[in-house]
Amino acid sequence: MVIKFCFILLILNFSSTFAQDIIYLNGKKTINAKIVETDNESIKYLHNPNRPTFTVPRSEIKEINFENGAVEVFRNVPPPSSLSIEQLKSKILEKINSYTFDAKSTTRPYRASFEGDYLKLWIMRSRGDEPYSKPILFDFSRAYDFQDISYRSNEAFINIFVGFLDKKGKVDKVKLVIRVLEKEQAEKIVTLLKTYNRLLAEKSIRIEKS
């Protein structure tokens, strides 16, 4: 009896250490698994190394929380992109530096750059040559929720719950609000950021497998 009990504990402990990724489905069901492969249509995962691979369509997934802390959101997922991460970064910078402003003032534009995979954002003063605030590093591998764009007259507001580095270098969550004066540009920016979130998640899977 003791041997059987110890064997059960061993199995439970093995399962908990192996199944580190959490898949949240649209119907509120969760799957504890290890994701081993992704493509444009589906996600493949294991419950443990000795079991067969299971497949779940991307259309049935709400969110994935990865073992390393990365989060991929599947709400209104953009179509697959042929761009590399570096090409995507270039387009993100082009859009943000051309069309975005502080949520509280249209006289204070955003400026952006990248530090590694972190998106570095700071708000400039009205002249555009002096920072209004200290820059913040945003971690789009941890984009928790892309909310619907808010439209008001001739402008739009992007609303994203995303990770950022605090003063101690730890990742925390914040609501990032960006004002965009051209509505169609707001939609393009959100699509680029969603695609970036997806590519970062896929990058983390490749690193874990290597």
Image: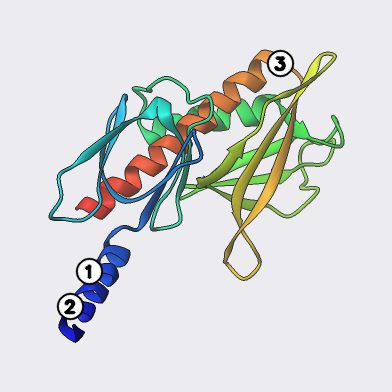
Image quadrant where residue 60 sits: top left
Q: Earlier in the sequence, mark 1 or mark 3?
A: 1
146 left or right of 130? left
The x, y position of residue 164, in whole percent, is: 61, 54
Q: Which residue is mark 1?
A: 11
Does residue 88 appear left or right of residue 188 in this picture?
left
* Category of crowding for the residue at label 1, using alpha-carbon neighbours closer than 10 angstroms: few (below 14), some (14–19), many (at least 20): few
Comes first in the chain, label 2 or label 1: 2
The quadrant in which residue 98 appears is top right
Q: Position of residue 107 (x, y in %)?
A: 86, 32
- Within 10 Å of disc 3 (Cα), the crowding (few <14, some 14-19, many 20+) is some
In the picture of the structure, the residue carrying the numbered disc 2 is 4
Classify 1 as above or below 152.
below
User: Type of residue at label 3?
Assistant: Lys
Q: Residue furthest bottom?
A: 2
C-alpha gap between disc 2 and disc 1: 11 Å
Callout 2: 10 Å neighbours few (<14), some, many (20+)? few
- Where is residue 42 shown, x and y percent of the image? 30, 29
* Circle count: 3
The amino acid type of the residue labelled 2 equals Lys
The residue lying at 62 percent from left, 19 percent from top is 187
In this rendered view, identify the residue nearer to me: 194 or 60: 60
Figure quadrant of the N terminus: bottom left
Marks 2,1: beta carbons within 8 A: no
Front label number (2 vs 1)? 2
- Residue where numbered disc 3 is placed: 183
Q: Residue at x 38, y 57 (%)?
A: 67
Q: Counting residues from the N terminus, which is met first, the one under dot 3 or under dot 2?
A: 2
